[in-house]
Image (cartoon, coloured by chain):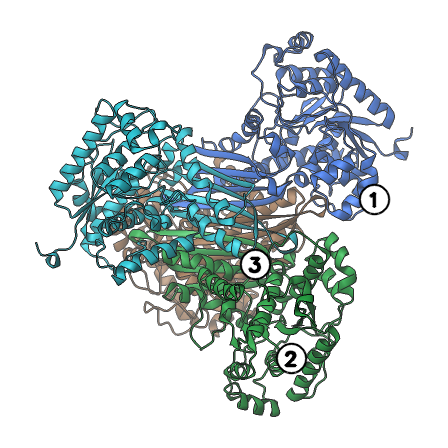
Chain colours: A cyan, B green, C brown, D blue
Amino acid sequence: MNVMSRRRKVGVAVIGMGGAVATTAAAGLEILRQGTNRMDGLPLAHLAIPRMVQYEDLSLQGWDLNAQSLADAAVEHRVLQPDQLASVEPALAALKPWAGVASAAYCRRIEGANMHHASGHRAAVEAISADLSRFQKTGDYDGIVMINLASTERTPAPSEAWATPEAFERGLDADDPAIGPAMLYAYAAISAGVPYGNFTPSTSAEVPALVALAKRQGVPLAGKDGKTGQTLIKTVLAPAFRARSLHVDGWFSTNILGNRDGEALQDPDSLQSKLGTKGNVLDSILGYPVEDHLVDIRYYRPRGDDKEAWDNIDLTGFLGQRMQIKVNFLCKDSVLAAPLVLEIARVLDLAQQRGDAGPQEQLSLFFKAPMTAHGQAPEHAFPVQERMLHDWLMADAAA
Amino acid sequence: MNVMSRRRKVGVAVIGMGGAVATTAAAGLEILRQGTNRMDGLPLAHLAIPRMVQYEDLSLQGWDLNAQSLADAAVEHRVLQPDQLASVEPALAALKPWAGVASAAYCRRIEGANMHHASGHRAAVEAISADLSRFQKTGDYDGIVMINLASTERTPAPSEAWATPEAFERGLDADDPAIGPAMLYAYAAISAGVPYGNFTPSTSAEVPALVALAKRQGVPLAGKDGKTGQTLIKTVLAPAFRARSLHVDGWFSTNILGNRDGEALQDPDSLQSKLGTKGNVLDSILGYPVEDHLVDIRYYRPRGDDKEAWDNIDLTGFLGQRMQIKVNFLCKDSVLAAPLVLEIARVLDLAQQRGDAGPQEQLSLFFKAPMTAHGQAPEHAFPVQERMLHDWLMADAAA
Amino acid sequence: MNVMSRRRKVGVAVIGMGGAVATTAAAGLEILRQGTNRMDGLPLAHLAIPRMVQYEDLSLQGWDLNAQSLADAAVEHRVLQPDQLASVEPALAALKPWAGVASAAYCRRIEGANMHHASGHRAAVEAISADLSRFQKTGDYDGIVMINLASTERTPAPSEAWATPEAFERGLDADDPAIGPAMLYAYAAISAGVPYGNFTPSTSAEVPALVALAKRQGVPLAGKDGKTGQTLIKTVLAPAFRARSLHVDGWFSTNILGNRDGEALQDPDSLQSKLGTKGNVLDSILGYPVEDHLVDIRYYRPRGDDKEAWDNIDLTGFLGQRMQIKVNFLCKDSVLAAPLVLEIARVLDLAQQRGDAGPQEQLSLFFKAPMTAHGQAPEHAFPVQERMLHDWLMADAAA
Amino acid sequence: MNVMSRRRKVGVAVIGMGGAVATTAAAGLEILRQGTNRMDGLPLAHLAIPRMVQYEDLSLQGWDLNAQSLADAAVEHRVLQPDQLASVEPALAALKPWAGVASAAYCRRIEGANMHHASGHRAAVEAISADLSRFQKTGDYDGIVMINLASTERTPAPSEAWATPEAFERGLDADDPAIGPAMLYAYAAISAGVPYGNFTPSTSAEVPALVALAKRQGVPLAGKDGKTGQTLIKTVLAPAFRARSLHVDGWFSTNILGNRDGEALQDPDSLQSKLGTKGNVLDSILGYPVEDHLVDIRYYRPRGDDKEAWDNIDLTGFLGQRMQIKVNFLCKDSVLAAPLVLEIARVLDLAQQRGDAGPQEQLSLFFKAPMTAHGQAPEHAFPVQERMLHDWLMADAAA
């Protein structure tokens, strides 16, 4: 086949395919394919990077514990406008999630019948690998990327099995309980040479064993926990407070949300994972510990997918004088997240074409707890992250 | 005298010396001289730039139409805490403003008895020059900088006299009404080789005649209109919206403030000048015209110097979905402004030592409507401005 | 006809029939007729008052300068959900506004082709009367009520013609410019024995001439300016501040809205009328003048009919200590107003059955500037107003 | 003694005398005695009720586990302005709390050395009674009132001992753990014929045993949990939503505060007591269960006594359309609470003069969970409560 005659096609294998984010992303791709002149929300839409796959040439498929079609899921999530829903219904009806791998020990609240009844870690990995292989063959894709959009897992206690690829293999053999579903998916992706991005707070590809394996296999990684609303605002404002030497005495953040994610976060263990990735950004950007940095997340049904955040920031300025800023963000969780998922997939695919293996720091812009290549502390300041991605992309634009 | 044996001393000649910002700056310098370990609000306090004058070595003096001492002014402005007021009272009592130059045609509301009764432009310039010269001699300063902190003037209609230094000279001879007080001060500064910074929205050093004169005379300029509260937040948030491709459908900004500045802005002409410098930042950063960008400023006495801003931002994201952000900033106008005035003075003095003449773009970070060196559109994005200043300062740190 | 065998039918003749409020009210009646179990927003829905007309038995028709059908108007106003719009489309398509009476001197911005080309006041009154008479005959109603929902007129200078019914008659003969369209409609209603409610700030039935005429003719009146959003909140909170002796130092209110009403208020004269009715409630409730009570209204298109209000209240409590409350109301103008219009019509019709003539104070609950029976200052406190209406209605329930 | 020749003097025995509320109340009385023309924050200051004790004639004293003088406490609480602090310092320095009764099982976090080392319930009651008796003798008061302002206790499991006065006596004999410190104080007060008001959420005089005892002894009671900030706003707004038939779909409330009360609420048991009294007001006023009514309280140090509440209210109006209100209250806890404490003491003393025994429902206005006379559900709507108190007071004014 002549390279010039064909545009690159990429398949995105999504964990949590029936969730609001994945459904919105799939619907969005369909709307883009139907033709639209509005590219709002897609951060990289205005760039012309020759090797980067175009949005219309991305195909989403994947696993979900709920077997309902994405058309049914879309109705339930109530993210799309009625006319949008109508226009994508046929395409979404054809998308039926594959049976997934799950563990009640890692995520209590989310249940579903659409499950691999795999006995043990090795069987689970084989099932995932078989799905990936079939996805690739069916779609005749030039590249495959895996993205984790599943419900947040509890954070397991650190284990020996995470230390090296060899220890991890032994852990798989022994069905080590410190290896959860998110790690099994990541391992399957890396083993198959498939770039892996973790949009959730769950522990997965960032354990040393999988980072080392990815580098060895030449597989790009990215994560973790998509930076969509409140943390986005934090990493935008905090660098400005630092630049103005306004001392942050306290930062109180509360969130109300009523979608499945919010429901899952009623499990205190999952909530703890979520709060973990939200907690460090301020101190890292400001260079000192913020003594009163509180983050609340509450499940509040009247909002559905319309998330709301309220932040109160206490500042001390010149002569010890006190000031306050309050930020109230009425956002839509999936509407903010879905386009980031698409961009992460596109950049991971480009990274693989460029031969970049291991953590892709240039994707820090899209994550609350960015993975770093050499174990250093991540960059959290939004403007610096933006420049990192811009510079990385420009290298390719120039090439 | 041995350079090593003496620290650089700089005198800052302030127009509007009795206002809240100047009074707070003068009080702050006194508190710094008395020794404090808190440098909050001073953006450049943590940098070690050898040639940059230290805060303790700055002395503020200047003109005001109100003859009251700064101690009396400080009581009236109610910015300082009682214990701070007590500690600086003796120092501020000694600061008595010089008689100023004014024009009822340029600023109706602000009246005062402490006025040069100069007949015509040339006499006014001579009076200002004489004050500068006396200030220099009395203080034995290594450098002098002039900063405009006076009440906002109305914006005059553009005039022939602004075009070239020669035309400006003819305008001075002819008492051209298109030359207002702010321009007379700027001209006097430039003529005397004194760097000039305009912290107000008034038309002054940015007219081509004075820019050309400053370049000719080797005098650094900076302006205009200090970026303290709401516009600061705008230039911090808007680059992030652009980076996330969140389309800004509308941005409504309202401000309530009860200090003398607020009172002066009850004059519709002064208000117009103020709104002018606030108006362009969004379109410039976003790259498209924001159709509904509204800015209100209201004089509201219960707050005194405690200014409050409320912003509502309407955004469109992925799939045309709408979101909102509201920002409520309870700030203190003078507390935010005073340290910027000190930093502008320090950087202008350093620029003069480095031989940089004309508009100092690296100071864009501190202004709502930054002057540019070659007439190009200014950079408004806060993170880019921050890097510009950082790079400029680092050149000196390395030297 | 046997009274027992037939439910009372009432026709509501609306001035401004194509506006968002009237269209929403008409659509709402249709949805109620189609059957729904949700009576949200209808304050009197839970009461069983035998003689009060039921919602399903109200019929709206009326005048508008725009001839488009209410189905087309509903599409334009974007208040209804798509499924609601679909269900009421046939009924609204049949509603085509009658040609209205207008005056460019009273309302500059609103133009329309659907106008009576009546030469002079008398001809205008006759045209309105003919419409009322035809409406009555066509619908075979047991009662007719007129409600003013037209765009806000400028406030005319007080005139001799307003003093007595006789002077008003002379003013009509002389085409007195102090008599505007809203007064012509009110006069036509009163003359025809039709109860009249003014939901707008325009000067109309409250002039002494028309009050006297209404009492003489036995016609109930109500007005003026519907109390929907920000003023509602004010009259709810202020009585509590008074009850707690929290002194209101200032109250800053700003509104952004993007519907036709907002557009009309860009005319400074109309805005002045609107601000007039908003201005007095605080002082009246609190018993002292609030020194800084500011109200801004801005036309802001991104919101359409979704109005937003932001209030900041400065309070002084025990020991002179200062506190603040901020209220942010994201409301829908027509959704709040339409049900009030229906209730006002129902109560006016009941008042007529009871023989109550002149200003109906018990309707104060629904107005920003309530009319009073004997020229006394109106009651603004929401809880007191609520009790007044409750007591009036209970008298009928008991009867 | 001639009634005309002497004004009534009342002693208020406060549990929690060193806390911010009691200290502010004591300071406020001193400032009132020194003479001031501002009565802000005192709800009943404008009424002339002949038998009601005047503010200047109230004397506060009481128990605290912390022995520091109120002058030292006032410095620590940082509620008063510096000049206020200076003016009351001598008076407050003379106020040294009596040793208190405490139980680690009821309130874990608050510790103090100033404790009665009473062995068992009977000894504790005797110690309290002795304090009351000494207080009365020393001050020669015409009346004594006890007010509970201590830190919130955990809610004990209901016990047999609460059922009747006799069972309570047996519980005292047996040192029943279901009888906590707040009940011991209340019992001591009632036994001594001293009116008792409970400004905290702790379980005390509302148990049937103590209500019955109070009625038998002719002692007025009031409680519980002072209604100061967020719940005040709730009981003001909710009646208006009901009056407008705006359906409350959800109400999310969060609070940040940094005073000792906030610190005590970090104990989950104490927090539970607090949330208990906050929880029922909405359903009671609205007449239906609000499905999503969430209340968070977080200890956030930057604020000290300056409490802040943020509420988000989701409403459904006409045609099922959704609206939102957000209320942000920047208040001062003690400044709101202290004057209510004074009014409660004055009304309780008046009730005793009038011979009213048991729960004083007319004081509902000042409590989150009002006690009722006959076990019926309490009235929560602020305007109704206001009328109840007004009517009760007017009976006395008329007498």
Kindly tell me whether residue C35 is visible in this rendering: no
Density class for disc 2 (Cα within 10 Å; few <14, some 14-19, many ≥20) is few
Residue C268, image x, y percentages: 49, 68
Q: Which residue is mark 2?
A: B104
Viewer-nearest of discs 3 and 1:
3
Cα distance between the residues tagged 2 and 3: 43 Å
Q: Which residue is pictured at 80% across the width and 42% down the height?
A: D88
Q: Which residue is mark 1?
A: D34
Residue C211, image x, y percentages: 54, 58
Quadrant occupied by the N terminus of chain A: bottom left
In the image, residue B260 sits, relative to residue D109, either above or below, namely below
In the image, residue A354 sits, relative to residue D350, either above or below, namely below
Which one is nearer the viewer's eye here, A360 or B302? A360
Residue D128, image x, y percentages: 76, 19
Quadrant occupied by the C terminus of chain A: bottom left
Which of the two labelled residues, at mark 2 and mark 3, occupies the earlier sequence position?
3
Amino acid at circle 1: Gln
Q: Chain of mark 3?
A: B
Amino acid at circle 2: Ala
Q: Chain of mark 1?
A: D
- Please give left or right for residue B187 compared with residue D85 in the image: left
- Please give left or right for residue C270 compared with residue C143 in the image: right
Q: Give the secondary structure at mark 3.
A: loop
Residue B352, image x, y percentages: 57, 74
Q: Which residue is mark 3?
A: B47
Amino acid at circle 3: Leu
Density class for disc 3 (Cα within 10 Å; few <14, some 14-19, many ≥20) is few
